[in-house]
Image (spheres, rainbow, N blue to C red):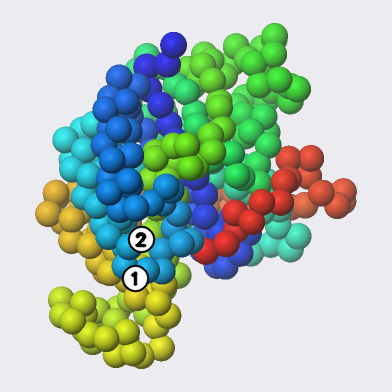
Amino acid sequence: MPSHLAFADETRYNIGRFRGVALVTLAAAKAPALEAELQVLLASAGLAEFKWERLRTARYRFAALALIDLVLARAAAGSLRVDVVVWDIADRRHAVQARDDVANLQRMYGFLFSSVLRLRWPAGSRWRLHPDEQTALDWHQVADCLDAAAGMAAPAAPDLFAAGGFRQRLRREFAIVQIAPLASQASPFVQLADLFAGLAVFSRAAYADYDRWQAAFGAQQHLWPPEASGSLSNSARERCLVLRHLDERCKAHKLGVSLKTRKGLWTRQPRNPVNFWWYVPQHPNDIAPRKRRRTMSPGLRLTGKGRA
């Protein structure tokens, strides 16, 4: 049985300059009570499911604010973590011809899992991973990536835990007992991962718009009619309000999250329970994977998860 659970989701893996993956982790014993709270919160907002891409109205904004308040309070109390990695396809690692965005997404999941599962929770933790099932990834290949991130070479297996060294290494090195994709509508924790991944990418991609909006309207923005925000769309206005709330609540809880310093959400100390991590090339040979000559990776499924 797992002692800890991890829930993951990605945003914009194949479109735009900035892409992201979020991981929500907590002890399995704390999950049922917190899940019940999240379900009550969503029901009171009149939502069957929260999705970042639908954040265009006040109703979704109010739900996002309530989710943020609950999650940050629990994170500050040590009950859970939220870790988000964001990468920039204009940097040296990613600005390559024929970049394979699906294979690169696999590696980013691998880096995130390796960092969080190994370093941020007690030794001896046993993990069940729950990614959103609506993904471009074949999770058997992600497991290969996890193995590679540990410096091991393991052959692909048709079954994640088929007999042999691959299964043994996954369990020994990462204490993974199961990888089980979930439908986001069935898991508030996957919805949280979607929210924080969306906020992280938006904070970088739209920081200039946010900064102008904040300078023009500040704390009084909610009193202005929509047309007063100039060229901002409905979704941009609502997302600016949510981003500002996250920034304010992180400061209130002393979580060490900065928005203005680097013009995007960023955490100086990765050990903090809300960690926004900007991926940078780790060494000169750290180059994003390129597509093979075959037209499509066997792990690719077209799902529309690249939308904002």
Q: Answer left or right for 68 relative to 223.
A: right
Horizontal side of 118 relative to 39 (left or right) equals right
Q: Give the amino acid at mark 2.
A: Tyr
Decide: is 60 above or below 283.
below
- Please name the residue shown 59% across and 39% down the image: 133
Determine whether 53 is above or below 71 in the image: below
Q: Which amino acid does label 1 sit on?
A: Glu
According to the image, label 2 marks what residue? 60
Secondary structure beneath label 1: helix
Residue at the image position 42 percent from the left and 47 percent from the top = 48
Instruction: Say left or right for 88 vs 76.
Output: right
Q: Which residue does the image show at 76% across and 60% down from the upper left?
A: 98
Q: Looking at the image, can residue 2 be seen?
A: yes
The answer to whether the residues at label 1 and label 2 have Cβ atoms under 8 Å apart is yes
Tell me the residue that label 1 is attached to: 238
The spot of residue 259 in percent (x, y) is: 28, 64
* Nearest the eye: 6 or 148: 6
Placement of 206 over or under 198, stated as above or below: below
Of residues 21 and 195, the one drawn nearer to the viewer in this rendering: 195
Lower position in the chain sequence, tag 1 or tag 2: 2
Q: Position of residue 225 (x, y in %)?
A: 27, 86
Q: Nearer the viewer, mark 1 or mark 2?
A: 2
Instruction: Give the quarter of the image for residue 132.
Output: top right
**Few, some or many residues within 10 Å of mark 1 (<14, 14–19, 20+):** many
Query: Crowding near pointer 2: few (<14 within 10 Å), some, many (20+)?
Result: many
In which quadrant will I find the N terminus? Answer: top left
Residue 233: x and y, percent? 42, 80
